[in-house]
Amino acid sequence: MPGTDHTDAPPSGGVFAVAGPVADKVVMSAEDIRRALTRVAHEIVERNQGVDDVVIVGIQRGGTWVAEQLAATLATFETMAVPVGVLDATFHRDDIGLRPVSVGAQSRIPVALDGRVVVLVDDVLFTGRTVRAALEALNEYGRPRAVQLAVVVDRGHRELPIRPDFVGKNLPTSRSEVVSVTPESVVIRGRVSA
């Protein structure tokens, strides 16, 4: 019967879908990440004229290791240690029913945030929804004088008017690609091999 046979239907992804294997593409090595975080650390010091009132807060999960590494980098050229905290913004998300909830994630903020400069840290900035949730979650720990945002990768595609103050790398991507950031590398997944 005409119209019921789907053998002439376009391939998944539409008429212009590209066939071929999907490959991972490494865009930053561990050394690239180290250099980027060193630059970001210097920018934080410069912008805040030191680190006297600065607190580094990593957003669970991806921002946790970045915050720790950033604080360790700051310690190599600043005389005082910068307090480092971890923030779980899960229950402040506007898409909580659409994403899996991370069990066991916990906020740990080592100092009162009132009157301080909080550098909120994450691995990847994409839509801005995680940062929006983190800003709301920060309210539970005081009223900072200022909140600045540092990310390893800014990949664009913002859905909210959020812009980072410190960026390791601007990385234009398609919405379908996945960016994975670890201490060892930054990898784009889902890119079709050429």
Image (cartoon, helix red, strand yellow):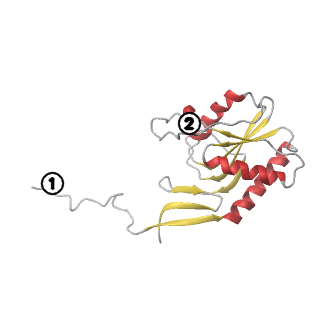
The one of 86 and 98 positioned closer to us in this rendering: 86
Label 2 residue SS: helix
Can you say whether 141 is above or below 1 in the image? above
Going by the picture, which residue comes out furthest to the front?
104
Q: Residues within 10 Å of mark 2 (few under 14, many from 20)?
A: many
Question: Could you give the CA–CA distance between mark 2 and mark 1, rounded to whole angstroms?
Answer: 45 Å
Amino acid under label 1? Thr
Label 1 residue SS: loop
Provide residue 153's location: percent of width, then percent of height. Answer: 64, 54
Q: Quadrant of residue 52?
A: top right
- Identity of the residue drawn at 71% across and 65% down: 31
Amino acid under label 2? Thr
Q: Residues within 10 Å of mark 1 (few under 14, many from 20)?
A: few
Provide residue 101's location: percent of width, then percent of height. Answer: 50, 39
Classify residue 49 as left or right of residue 17.
right
Can you say whether 94 is above or below 40 in the image? above
- Identity of the residue drawn at 71% across and 29% down: 141
Q: Earlier in the sequence, mark 2 or mark 1?
A: 1
Provide residue 107's location: percent of width, then percent of height. Answer: 65, 36
What is the count of numbered marks? 2
Q: Which residue is mark 2?
A: 90
Classify residue 139 as left or right of residue 113.
left
Tell me whether circle 2 and circle 1 mark residues in contact (CB < 8 Å). no
Going by the picture, which residue comes out furthest to the right?
79
Q: Nearer the viewer, mark 2 or mark 1?
A: 2
Going by the picture, which residue comes out furthest to the left?
1
Q: Which residue is mark 1?
A: 4
Can you say whether 159 is above or below 69 in the image? above
Provide residue 49's location: percent of width, then percent of height. Answer: 88, 44
- Identity of the residue drawn at 60% across and 46% down: 61
* Quadrant assignment for the N terminus: bottom left
